[in-house]
Image (cartoon, grey):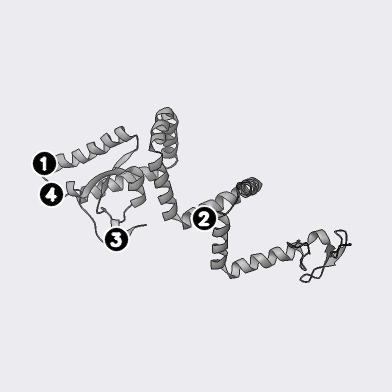
C-alpha cells in the first residue's frame, strides 16, 4: 500500500512566511505528517509564546528539567559549552548579570556547598597554601588603595563605637572573642571573623564595639551579612 504522506524530496510552502522550502525544513509530527509552518517560523512562534507567557514557560521548563534523561543532560551540557566557546565574553556577562539578580540564591548555594565540603576546603587550604597567599597578594595589589581606605574607615568606626566607659575586663572580653575566632579557624580550617551583631554602620541603628555585641562566625557568613541586621535578611 502506498504511503499517503508526501515524499521528503517534495517542496512545501510555509503558511507563515509563504516561502517554498524542502520538506526537510518542516518538523515531523508523531504520526509522520509534517507541520504546515517551517522550522524557522516554528522557532519564532515558540519564542514569542514564551515571552508572552513567562509563568507557563517557567513551569514547563522546570518540569522538563526534572524529567531529563542522562542523554538529554549531556546534550544540553555540550550545547552550553559550544555557546560559551563561541562567545565567552557574552557568556561571562550573562553569568555576572544572573548572579547580580540572584545574589541571595548564589550566597545560599555557596554557603551550603562550603558547609558540606568543609573537609575538602581544609585539605585544599593546606595543599595550596602558597597559591592562595599569592592570590590574596594579587587581589590586594589590584585594590590596595581601596582596601586601605576601607580598613581605615572600619578602624575609625570601631573607635567611635567604643564607649568611654569600657572597662579593662570588657576589653579582655573583646580580646577573648577575637582569640575564639582564631581558635575556630585553626580547628576547622575555615576562616572566621569577629562580627558585630548590631552593625557599627547601619541605616536604622548603629551598634557598639562591646563584648556582648561581638560573635565569632565563619568569614563567608560575615561577608554575606555585611552591614545588615539579622532580621533584614538578604
Q: Which residue is mark 4?
A: 164
Place residue 137 in its image quadrant. Answer: top left
Q: Residue at x 79, y 60 (%)?
A: 25
Q: Which of the labelled discs sits on residue 67, or is there none?
A: none
Q: CA distance from mark 3 to mark 4?
A: 23 Å
Characterize the local packing of mark 3: few (<14), some (14-19) or many (20 or more) Cα atoms within 10 angstroms.
few
Characterize the local packing of mark 4: few (<14), some (14-19) or many (20 or more) Cα atoms within 10 angstroms.
few
Q: Residue at x 23, y 36 (%)?
A: 179
Q: Which of the labelled discs sits on residue 97, or is there none?
A: 2
Q: Earlier in the sequence, mark 1 or mark 2?
A: 2
Q: Residue at x 20, y 50 (%)?
A: 213
Q: CA distance from mark 4 to mark 2?
A: 46 Å
Q: Which residue is mark 1?
A: 169
Residue contact between numbered discs 1 and 2, judged by CB atoms under 8 Å: no
Q: CA distance from mark 3 to mark 1?
A: 31 Å
Q: Nearer the viewer, mark 3 or mark 4?
A: 3
Characterize the local packing of mark 1: few (<14), some (14-19) or many (20 or more) Cα atoms within 10 angstroms.
few
Q: Nearer the viewer, mark 4 or mark 2?
A: 2
Q: Earlier in the sequence, mark 3 or mark 4?
A: 4
Residue contact between numbered discs 2 and 3, judged by CB atoms under 8 Å: no
Q: Nearer the viewer, residue 94 or 50?
A: 50
Q: Which of the labelled discs sits on residue 203, or is there none?
A: 3
Viewed as shown, does residue 93 lie left or right of 86?
left
Viewed as shown, does residue 125 lie left or right of 24?
left
Q: Nearer the viewer, residue 212 or 24?
A: 24
Q: Earlier in the sequence, mark 3 or mark 1?
A: 1
Tell me the element at label 2. helix
Amino acid at each position: 500500500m502506498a504511503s499517503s504522506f508526501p515524499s521528503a524530496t517534495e517542496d512545501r510552502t510555509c503558511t507563515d512566511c509563504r516561502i517554498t522550502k524542502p520538506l526537510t525544513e518542516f518538523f515531523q509530527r508523531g504520526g509522520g505528517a509534517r507541520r504546515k509552518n517551517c522550522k524557522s517560523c516554528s522557532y519564532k512562534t515558540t519564542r514569542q509564546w514564551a515571552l508572552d507567557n513567562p509563568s507557563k514557560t517557567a513551569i514547563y521548563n522546570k518540569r522538563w528539567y526534572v524529567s531529563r534523561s542522562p542523554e538529554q543532560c549531556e546534550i544540553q551540557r555540550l550545547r552550553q559549552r559550544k555557546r560559551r566557546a563561541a562567545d565567552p565574553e557574552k557568556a561571562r556577562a550573562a553569568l555576572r548579570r544572573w548572579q547580580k539578580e540572584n545574589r541571595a540564591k548564589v550566597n545560599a548555594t555557596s554557603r551550603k556547598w562550603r558547609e558540606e565540603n568543609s573537609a575538602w576546603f581544609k585539605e585544599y587550604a593546606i595543599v595550596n597554601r602558597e597559591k592562595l597567599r599569592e592570590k590574596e597578594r594579587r587581589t590586594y595589589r589590584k585594590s590596595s588603595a581601596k582596601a586601605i581606605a576601607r580598613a581605615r574607615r572600619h578602624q575609625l568606626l570601631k573607635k567611635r563605637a567604643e564607649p568611654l566607659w569600657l572597662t579593662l575586663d570588657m576589653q579582655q572580653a573583646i580580646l577573648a572573642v577575637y582569640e575564639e575566632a582564631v581558635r575556630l579557624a585553626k580547628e576547622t580550617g575555615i576562616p572566621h571573623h569577629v562580627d558585630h551583631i548590631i552593625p557599627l554602620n547601619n541605616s536604622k541603628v548603629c551598634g557598639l564595639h562591646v563584648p556582648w555585641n561581638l560573635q565569632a562566625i565563619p568569614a563567608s557568613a560575615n561577608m554575606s551579612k555585611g552591614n545588615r541586621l539579622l532580621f533584614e535578611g538578604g
